[in-house]
Amino acid sequence: MPDTLMPSAADRLALMVNGEARAVAPGTSVTDLLAEIGLAERKVAVERNLEIVPRSQYATTILCAGDAIEIVHFIGGG
Amino acid sequence: MPDDIKMPVATDDSWEVAGRRFNSRLIVGTGRYKTLKQTGESIRASGAEIVTVAVRRVNLSDATAPMLQDFVSPKDYTYLPNTAGCHTAQEAVRTLRLAREAGGWNLVKLEVLGPPPYLYPDMAGTFEAAAALLEDGFEVMVYCADDPVAAKRLEEMGCVAIMPLGAPIGSGMGVVNPYMIRSIKQNAKVPVLVDAGIGTASEAAFAMELGCDAVLLNSAIAHAQDPVKMAVAMKHAVIAGREAFLAGRMPRDYRADASSPMSGLIR
C-alpha cells in the first residue's frame, strides 16, 4: 500500500463497545479508545473478546475489526 | 474528643476477614440511593469501613458523569465488588475478574442468584463460581442460602466469609430463619454475616445478637425516609446487638420474677 494513502472513512474498523457499534481508525489502541471516549484509565477495566486487558497493556493492545470491547467501572450496588 | 469519652466498643472488639481487620461490624451497599451525594453522606454516617459495589458498563455517551469513587473514595473504604445481577457462575466469575482489574484487589462478594421474585441464592451456581474464583486466587465472601450444610461446604472450599440471607434481597423482612442463621454461625470457623433482608435497626441488632460477626445491608438505609438518620441507627444497632451478644442475655421464663425486693413492703 502506498504510504501516501490516507485512511478514509471506509478504512475505519467496525467494532462493538459496550454493545454499541463504533468505528475506530486502524492502529487504535485501548489507551486511544479510552481517551477518545474521555475515560480515566484508572477508573475502568477493559475486556476484549471476553479476555481481560491488563492495564499495563492498554497502550500496546491494538484493536481489530470485529472486536467486542467491554468497558466497566464500579457503581452503587448492594 | 477527649479520650475519656471515646466509645471503646468499636476498637476493642474488632473482627477480621481474610487477614484484614475492621472495627465496624456493619457493611453497607452503595446502591439505590437518590443521588451519589446522599450515598456518600449515608455511608459516612453508618461508620462502615467496607462497602459493596457493583460492576457495570460505563456510560459511553457521558464519560464525564460523576462516578461513585468521587463520593465514596476507595481510599477511605474497602471496596467489596459484588456480582449482583449474575444468574450463572460464568457471569459471576467474568464480573469479578473485571472488578479485580478495575480495583486491583482480590476480596470480593460472590452472589449467584436464582430467578425473581425471590432472587434466592442459586447454590449450584454459587459452588461452581466459588470453586473457579478460589482457584483464581480470589478471597471470596459468599452470599448463600440459610443452609448449614451448604455454608459449611463453602467454608471448607476456602471461602473467607459465609453470608447467608436473612430474607430475600431488598425485602426488608428481617431475619426470618434465625434458628438456621445461629446454627451456621455455631458451625463456622470463618466470619458469618447476615446479608440481605434487614429492614430496620432492631433486625440488624437481632442478627448480631444471634452471634453473627457482622451485618451487610443496603436497602434498609437507602430506602428509609431519611437515609442518613437510618445509617446512624444501623451503626448503633449493630453495636448494641454485638454488645448484647457478648453480654449474654438473661434466660427466658414464662413466669414473672419481680425486680424489686419483696422484703420491707409497707403494711
Image: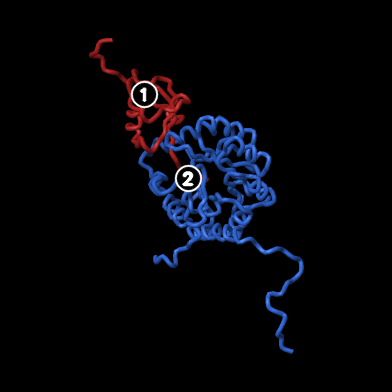
Chain colours: A red, B blue
Residue at 34% x, 18% y: name it.
A11
Residue at 33% x, 31% y: name it.
A36
Query: Is B88 drawn above or below residue B69 in the view shown?
Result: above
Q: In which quarter of the image is the N terminus of chain A?
A: top left
Q: Are marks 2 and 1 on the same chain?
A: no
User: Which residue in the rendered view is the most extreme toward the top?
Assistant: A1
Where residue A44 appears, as percent x and y from the top left, is 40, 36
Tell me the distance, in whole angstroms, between the alpha carbons under discs 2 and 1. Answer: 35 Å
Q: How crowded is mark 2: few (under 14 residues within 10 Å), some or many (20 or more)?
A: few
Q: In the image, B250: left or right of A4?
A: right
For residue A53, say whether it is visible. yes
Residue at 70% x, 85% y: name it.
B264
Q: Which quarter of the figure has residue B158?
A: top right
Where residue B243 appears, as percent x and y from the top left, is 57, 60
Question: SS for tag 2?
Answer: strand
For residue A20, say whether it is visible. no
Query: Is A16 drawn above or below residue B154 in the view shown?
Result: above
Q: Residue B262 carries which label?
A: none
Residue at 46% x, 53% y: name it.
B43
User: Which residue in the rendered view is the most extreme toward the left?
Assistant: A4
Give the residue pinned by disc 2: B20
The amino acid sitting under disc 2 is: Arg
Q: Which quarter of the figure has residue B130?
A: top right
Q: Residues within 10 Å of mark 1 (few under 14, many from 20)?
A: some
Give the residue pinned by disc 1: A61
Chain on which label 1 sits: A
User: Which residue in the rendered view is the most extreme toward the right?
Assistant: B255
Residue nearer the viewer, B157 or A40:
B157
Question: SS for tag 1?
Answer: loop
Residue nearer the viewer, B72 or A7:
B72
Chain on which label 2 sits: B
The amino acid sitting under disc 1 is: Thr
